[in-house]
Amino acid sequence: MGMKIGIGLPNQVREMDPAIIPTWATRAEKAGFSSLGSIGHIAYPGLMDTVALAAAAGATSTIGLISHIMAAPMWPAVLLAKEVAGIDAVSGNRLTLGISVGARSDDFLVDGLGPRGRGKRLDRDLEVYRSIWRGETVGGASNPLVPAGTRSVPLMFGGGSPASFERMARWGEGYIGPSAPVGMAAKMFDAAGSAWKKAGREGSPRLVAIAYYVFSDVAQGRANVQHYYSASGQRTIDIVDSGICAGPDAVRDAVKAYSELGVDEIIFTPALADTHEVGRLAEVVL
């Protein structure tokens, strides 16, 4: 079976109109993409990834849904677990929750949930997620927080620290690579495979690659991506920018390179909030 090809939702493209999400999702499903992905960034004027995924869930019936990647520790664990379970249920169990500890300190806006100690907090939160999804009561609640029959939502992890890979091997079904050039992502996938084996897991982790793409207005697309990462520093901007697939040839090259790496799925993240970009990508890769 060949590598699957998914497409991201434009939920964090600069100046995007949130009303585009349902239309984008239905076009992506009709075109035959494997998954719809979402980016998470609170301190940016985009659409919350949970909202984008919920809208996509309601507008589609078969395409997979995945967050790539949500900074989970910026959420109260109980609320995120309930919200994620609801999105998954509405979609008919099509959601994969891709999470990490988060890289942008400005995203941690909830009082008491700052960036310090977020790794240890996520480890505790993961226990809470699973408890809630099993239908157990938490805190002072007198009832379960989710309906009977709620499943344990599949988890995938991103990040580059040793703790991130260990967490992936313990809790997840696989690893989501960075929005970076193929060579850099390949090293991350190798580290994920090593952590998987070290943890004694059978088989191999599911590997998902992420790549920005743009067809119609390359200059604007690059500007949008650079603006999105502006709070992350110039080094990050340069790394992400060098990995953008601008035009059909670059997209084909990315598909070939990631397929040769043995990646299970690549999700092309849009740099433009233009629904024509869905069809243009489909013509090249499907």
Image (cartoon, grey):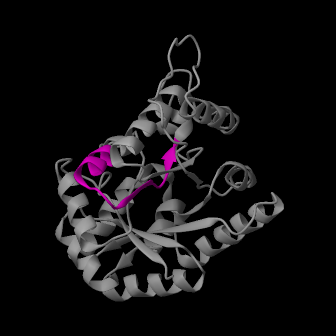
Residue at screen point 21% across, 47% down: 18
Residue 66 magenta: yes
Residue 241 location (% of width, % of height): 43, 69
Residue 174 location (% of width, % of height): 61, 60
What segment carries the magenta color? 52-71
Residue 213 location (% of width, % of height): 35, 72
Given residues 180 and 91, the one toward you in this image is: 91
Residue at screen point 83% across, 61% down: 198
Residue at screen point 62% across, 55% down: 159
Above-or-below relation of 167 to 226: above
Residue at screen point 55% across, 28% down: 135
Left or right of 26 in this view: 161: right
Q: Quadrant of residue 173?
A: bottom right
Given residues 146 and 70, the one toward you in this image is: 146
Residue 191 magenta: no
Decide if residue 215 is in sight here.
no
Above-or-below relation of 233 to 241: above
Decide if residue 31 is in sight here.
yes
Residue 185 location (% of width, % of height): 59, 71
Circle count: 0
Q: Quadrant of the C terminus?
A: bottom left
Q: Quadrant of residue 276?
A: bottom left
Left or right of 70 in this view: 32: left
